[in-house]
Image: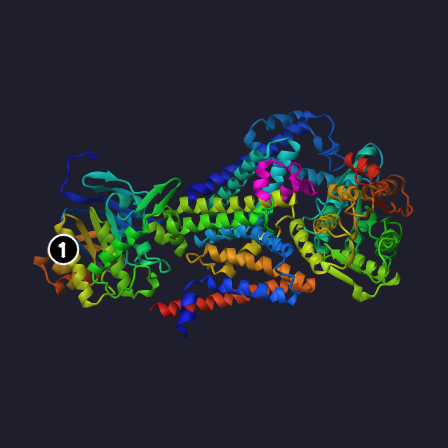
């Protein structure tokens, strides 16, 4: 039930702060992502991007601040709540269990079940079919069967699996943390297509990448994170990859100076 | 590598199965054809099912990345409680059984809560509980074995009676029954999927994907303790008594059976069928050695050798499997 | 995590408070010190101004702090009293520490019972039985060490060999009376005090016991027949000695060593039963079974009966299974070392030493009683009254 006016902002972060003991990693992040908008998040290492991702995905709780999904204030006790709120995350370390099969990984936490009290019985055939289909769509044709163990896939294939998974379950927000790091050019292009498709469906996307050449073509806005804050928000049309890189490096240098 | 061997190794339970068959045949021949006799088979069945049911609980907990070393004390506690209630308080056996099971589920819950809220590894938490429960057992049993006086009750017979036309007693069937149930849960339910995932990286992956880590682990701790207690009660129904020393080695033996079966101590990879085979292998070894007249001093040594051989074999089989995967 | 730590802390403090409070209240309520609390003689010196203390203790949280302080104070008082006076008679309690081999076991449970019964029957004697959870010489040694650190008036020790010499000497040096029981060891010590103690122990010679039981048992089997010895505690040197005793007895009676098998089992009764059943199936020509503890003996009797074999079997000690097996005829005889009497006499001996100053009360052999079909009814009656011989 919406508590305020229906918002075109799919995700809104207000004053998010995160402190680990005495270390303040996020010092007040204000960010909003509209429906069908791709927001790129760039910044140097240690700027707080991964922490922010973890807070959005529900893995961590912010020390203070609010998260709103479609204008409704949400409090995530765990990633489960975030997924229920329609936020899907592709983590940097993928969150794939190597010793489980592909389809089990695909549906982890969101299995299709049939209730046979007291058990929730898996509908294996259905899940396998869906998994197979979606993986194929994303180009993972080299996989013989979805019963294969995830460890038998290459790094890039696992990344594709993680992305496919999130794309399949997404409903409001898609957060991608360095999703194409291990991918080939062709695979990267496919991921970009998926991001555009998500945008087309009205999903808000947060996209984090080190490589400015990936961010620029696909983002509607780019936020530069520096020292736990959003230093600038810039439109791709207003900048080039090189300038952006300089901006990030300078921001990094500034923060070095600050910390002395 | 020979394609047939590779195919066989894909099913990791082949190893312990072949071992079981080979060992049984070897004992049969070495003992002058005494192994496959009804008396001997019943001994193997009793020895195996006693550890086997405990091993089932240990397996599912191990898959989710935790250990329970208190199972041997729990194995003794449940029947001591049950027999005391029946003998001294005149309770009907079913009620006594239910109370005993509730008591051990509290133990399982305590093991789980201790592990999760204090941050100490389950290995240590359950070790502490092992000593605590052993003391409770001594206080309850007061030193002498506790005998079950009510043996004709229907529930007792369902639990421990001999099966007609077979040399087995009921606990063996219960072991296979629980085994099938646990296999089903592991393979075909979301709890099973969650259990596996939680075993990886202490549950951080599962947590990130929204799996209810704490709930799942708690359930597994309780299941492990309940199976240990039930196994003790089944033995009580079959054998007629329990003492503080009942199942005294079962915590380690269950781990031996589980490892022989191919479950990984690191979690995630586990097989219920393997643990059953491991338990059968242990039972076969223990009674077979007596049958062929091995000197008692060598038993522990041979159990150790079996464990090492099985573990090495399983590790090798795993590399073959992984290599042939891609 | 932090929240939970605090919770645990409060709980521990609350426990301290509750137990401290209960303990102190109990002391306040009773004008005389009850037996259970008076581990330490000469409490009168410690009481001080009772009314002032009551007021101070009114705040329950202070009890939590007071409890450990109280315990430290009491310990200090006790030490003081020991230093102040040598007089051990009068109306103060004698404290006797009775150190056993293991807690809760049919045999040792009876020793404990005998010892504490003597403590109850004798005026002014307080007996505390202590034993380790798991038997080992080192564990028992530790318990003796702890026991004598509380400076009891007397201590009963099951002296099993050289490793107990030092702790015995410490007890004697402290001024405690010492009594050996159960085993007759220590005659080879270089300390004449220990040798004397060994000569005046309360107990019986295991070898003699084996001989005595063999007298009856050997009437049931003949030389040349296969005999199996089931050793229920293979890690215990004492059990090994008994095993050797039987081997010698059988050899002397005409057996060839090859016809005797020693089979170590475990303490797990159900597992023993299965292994023994298997053993008997593999060796159908077995004519005799010898066990020397009740757990093993009971399992052997059942295994033999369930295998439908007619084998003569004997055990040591008494428990309900053994009694029933004898009545049913599945066990031919058992030997009781009369552990109740051992515990009882050992305490009496200590009492005599402490109160009257006897130097060497005589050696007491509670005698070995062979229990078989003929006297089982009488023994059962005694057992049902709570005392197993």
Front-lying residue, C173 or B65:
B65
- Residue appearing at x 68%, y 29% in the figure: C27
- Quick check: B173 above or below A210? above
Would you say B206 lies left or right of B284 here?
A: left
Front-lying residue, C209 or C190:
C209
Would you say C342 lies left or right of A22 here?
A: right
Dividing the image into 4 quarters, which one contains the N terminus of chain B?
bottom left
Q: Residues within 10 Å of mark 1 (few under 14, many from 20)?
A: some
Would you say C231 lies left or right of B278 here?
A: right
Q: Which residues are magenta?
A: B132-160
Quick check: can you spot residue C161? no
Q: Position of residue A95 (x, y in %)?
A: 32, 56
Q: Label 1: state its secondary structure.
A: helix
Quick check: can you spot residue C179? yes
Direction bottom: furthest residue: B1
Direction left: furthest residue: A237
Would you say C167 lies left or right of B317 here?
A: right
- Residue appearing at x 67%, y 27% in the figure: C28
Question: Chain letter of disc 1?
Answer: A
Residue at numbered disc 1: A196
Front-lying residue, B91 or C100:
B91
Q: Position of residue C13 (x, y in %)?
A: 54, 37
The part of the image, by quadrant, that contains residue B2 is bottom left
Q: Is residue B165 magenta?
A: no
- Residue appearing at x 89%, y 42% in the figure: C357
Q: How is the image coloured?
A: rainbow
Q: Position of residue C143 (x, y in %)?
A: 71, 49
């Amino acid at each position: 039930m919406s508590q305020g006016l229906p918002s075109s902002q799919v995700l809104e972060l207000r004053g998010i702060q995160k402190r680990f003991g005495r270390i303040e990693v996020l010092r007040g992040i204000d960010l909003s992502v509209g429906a069908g908008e791709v927001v790129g998040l760039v910044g140097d290492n240690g700027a707080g991007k991964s922490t922010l991702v973890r807070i959005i995905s529900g893995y961590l709780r912010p020390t203070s601040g609010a998260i709103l999904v479609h204008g409704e204030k949400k409090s995530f006790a765990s990633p489960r709540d975030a997924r229920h709120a329609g936020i899907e995350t592709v983590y940097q370390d993928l969150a794939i269990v190597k010793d489980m099969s592909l389809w089990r990984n695909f549906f982890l936490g969101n299995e299709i079940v049939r209730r046979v009290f007291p058990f929730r019985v898996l509908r294996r055939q259905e899940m396998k079919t869906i998994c197979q289909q979606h993986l194929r769509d994303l180009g993972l044709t080299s996989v013989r069967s979805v019963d294969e163990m995830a460890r038998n896939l290459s790094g890039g294939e696992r990344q594709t699996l993680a992305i496919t998974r999130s794309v399949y379950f997404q409903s409001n927000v898609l957060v991608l943390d360095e999703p194409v790091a291990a991918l080939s050019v062709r695979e990267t292009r496919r991921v970009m297509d998926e991001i555009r498709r998500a945008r087309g469906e009205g999903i808000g996307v947060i996209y984090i990448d080190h490589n400015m050449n990936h961010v620029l073509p696909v983002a509607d806005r780019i936020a530069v994170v520096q020292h736990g804050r959003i230093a600038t928000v810039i439109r791709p049309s207003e900048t080039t990859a090189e300038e952006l890189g300089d901006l990030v490096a300078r921001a990094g240098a500034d923060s070095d100076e600050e910390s002395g | 590598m020979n394609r047939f061997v590779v195919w066989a190794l894909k099913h990791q339970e082949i190893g312990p199965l072949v071992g079981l068959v080979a060992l049984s045949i070897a004992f049969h021949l070495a003992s002058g054809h005494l192994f496959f006799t009804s008396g001997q088979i019943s001994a193997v069945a009793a020895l195996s099912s006693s550890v086997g049911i405990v091993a089932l609980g240990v397996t599912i907990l191990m898959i989710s990345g935790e250990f329970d070393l208190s199972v041997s004390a729990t194995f003794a506690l449940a029947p001591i409680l049950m027999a005391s209630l029946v003998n001294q308080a005149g309770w009907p056996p079913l009620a006594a059984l239910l109370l005993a099971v509730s008591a051990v589920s509290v133990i399982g819950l305590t093991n789980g809560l201790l592990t999760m809220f204090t941050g100490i590894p389950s290995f240590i938490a359950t070790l502490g509980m092992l000593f605590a429960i052993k003391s409770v057992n001594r206080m309850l049993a007061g030193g002498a074995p506790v005998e079950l006086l009510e043996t004709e009750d229907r529930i007792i017979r369902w639990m421990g009676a001999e099966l007609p036309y077979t040399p087995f007693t009921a606990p063996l069937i219960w072991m296979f029954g629980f085994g099938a149930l646990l296999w089903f849960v592991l393979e075909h339910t979301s709890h099973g999927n969650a259990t596996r995932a939680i075993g990886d990286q202490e549950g951080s992956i599962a947590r990130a994907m929204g799996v209810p880590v704490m709930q799942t682990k708690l359930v597994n701790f309780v299941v492990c303790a309940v199976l240990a207690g039930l196994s003790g009660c089944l033995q009580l129904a079959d054998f007629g008594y329990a003492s503080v020393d009942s199942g005294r080695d079962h915590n380690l033996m269950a781990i031996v059976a589980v490892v022989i079966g191919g479950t990984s101590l690191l979690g995630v990879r586990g097989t219920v069928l393997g643990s059953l085979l491991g338990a059968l292998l242990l039972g076969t070894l223990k009674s077979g050695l007596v049958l062929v007249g091995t000197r008692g001093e060598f038993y522990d040594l041979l159990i150790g050798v079996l464990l090492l051989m099985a573990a090495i074999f399983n590790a090798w089989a795993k590399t073959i499997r992984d290599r042939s995967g891609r | 995590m932090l929240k939970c730590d605090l919770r645990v802390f409060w709980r521990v403090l609350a426990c301290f408070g509750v137990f401290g409070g209960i303990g102190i209240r109990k002391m306040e309520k009773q004008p005389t010190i009850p037996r259970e609390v008076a581990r330490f003689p000469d409490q009168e010196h410690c009481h001080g101004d009772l009314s002032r203390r009551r007021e101070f203790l009114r705040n329950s949280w202070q009890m939590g702090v007071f409890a450990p302080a109280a315990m430290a104070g009491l310990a200090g008082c006790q030490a003081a009293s020991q230093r102040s006076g040598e007089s051990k008679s009068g109306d103060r309690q004698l404290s006797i520490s009775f150190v056993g081999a293991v807690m809760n076991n049919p045999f040792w449970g009876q020793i404990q019972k005998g010892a504490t019964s003597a403590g109850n029957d004798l005026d002014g004697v307080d007996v505390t039985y202590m034993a380790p959870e798991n038997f080992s010489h080192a564990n028992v040694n530790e318990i003796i060490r702890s026991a004598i650190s509380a400076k009891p008036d007397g201590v009963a020790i099951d002296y099993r060999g050289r490793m107990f010499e030092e702790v015995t000497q410490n007890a004697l040096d402290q001024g405690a009376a010492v009594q050996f029981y159960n085993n007759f060891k220590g005659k080879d010590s270089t300390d004449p005090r220990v040798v004397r103690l060994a000569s005046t122990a309360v107990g019986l010679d295991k070898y003699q016991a084996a001989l005595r039981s063999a007298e009856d048992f050997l009437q049931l089997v003949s030389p040349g027949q296969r005999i199996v010895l089931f050793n229920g505690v293979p890690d215990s040197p004492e059990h090994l000695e008994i095993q050797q005793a039987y081997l010698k007895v059988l050899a002397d009676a005409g057996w060839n060593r090859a016809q005797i098998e020693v089979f170590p089992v475990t303490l797990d009764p159900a597992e023993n039963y299965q292994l023994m059943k298997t053993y008997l199936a593999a060796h159908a020509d077995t004519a005799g079974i010898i066990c020397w503890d009740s757990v093993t003996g009971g399992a052997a009797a059942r295994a033999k009966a369930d295998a439908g074999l007619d084998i003569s079997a004997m055990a040591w000690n008494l428990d309900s299974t053994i009694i029933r097996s004898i009545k049913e005829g599945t066990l031919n005889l058992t030997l009781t070392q009369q552990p109740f009497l051992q515990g009882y006499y050992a305490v009496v001996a200590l009492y005599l030493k402490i109160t009257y100053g006897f130097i060497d009360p005589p050696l007491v052999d509670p005698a070995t009683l062979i229990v078989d079909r003929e006297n089982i009814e009488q023994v059962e009656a005694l057992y049902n009254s709570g005392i197993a011989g």
